[in-house]
Image (spheres, helix red, strand yellow):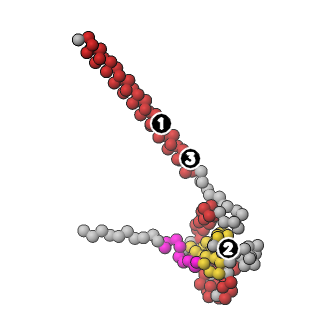
Amino acid sequence: MVKKRKKSNRGNLIKGVLLNISSDHFEAVGKELKKTIHGKPGIYALYKEDRLYYVGLASSLYGRVRWHLKDKHSGKWDHFSIFIIKSSKYLKDLETAIITIAEPKGNSTKGSIPNQRFLKRLLRKRIKEKRRTLKTKMINKNEEIENLKDSINQIEKAISEK
């Protein structure tokens, strides 16, 4: 019998990537870049040398990265990477996760995650349940030990009486 290979989910979210593009080259390849990524939603990362400086999201990557050549981030980054995302539905969550993990210097807003305390509460609840279970088991074991001690004492008493 031949096993069917499971279809991969790879590529369902990220539809294209451009990595390590120099800001100096932005204008030189601007028209081609615009044709390629204009109107495409995604996440972008701005770097200064080899350090992540800023992470952002955009409904149109081309315009947003181009804007950063002129805004308050101008001159603070020298190359960028973009990740085209299939749907803008999850962009904010992706951006928040990346910023939370990487803590880029240029991002002043960290974003918030709804239900971010949910897993902590769930874990605490499960730990409490585990403690209760272990406590109950310990009480039962202690009772077993006491019963064994009583049995041993009875046997010793019976032996000594003979």
What whole-number distance in Å separates the C-alpha atoms at marks 2 and 1? 52 Å
Determine the CA span between mark 3 and mark 2. 39 Å
| Residue 129 visible somewhere in the drawing | yes
Q: Which residue is mark 2?
A: 48
Residue 49: image quadrant is bottom right
Mark 2–mark 1 CB contact (< 8 Å): no
Q: Quadrant of residue 158?
A: top left
| Circle 2 Cα neighbour tier, 10 Å, few/some/many (<14 / 14–19 / ≥20) | some
Q: Report the residue at 56% width, 49% height from top.
A: 120
The amino acid pointed to by label 1 is Arg
Q: Select label 2 or label 1 by which is in front.
A: 2
**Residue type marked 2:** Lys
Relative depth, front residue between 154 and 118: 154
Is 13 included in the stretch rendered in magenta?
yes
* Residue stretch rendered in magenta on the structure: 11-19
Residue receiving disc 1: 132
- Looking at the rendered structure, the secondary structure element under dot 2 is strand
Report the front residue among 131 and 86. 131
Q: Quadrant of residue 101?
A: bottom right
Residue at image location 76% in from the left, 73% down from the top: 72
129 falls in the magenta region? no
Residue 35: x %, y % from top left: 61, 86
What kind of element bears circle 3? helix
Q: Disc 3 designates what residue? A: 121
- The number of discs equals 3
Name the quadrant of the C terminus: top left
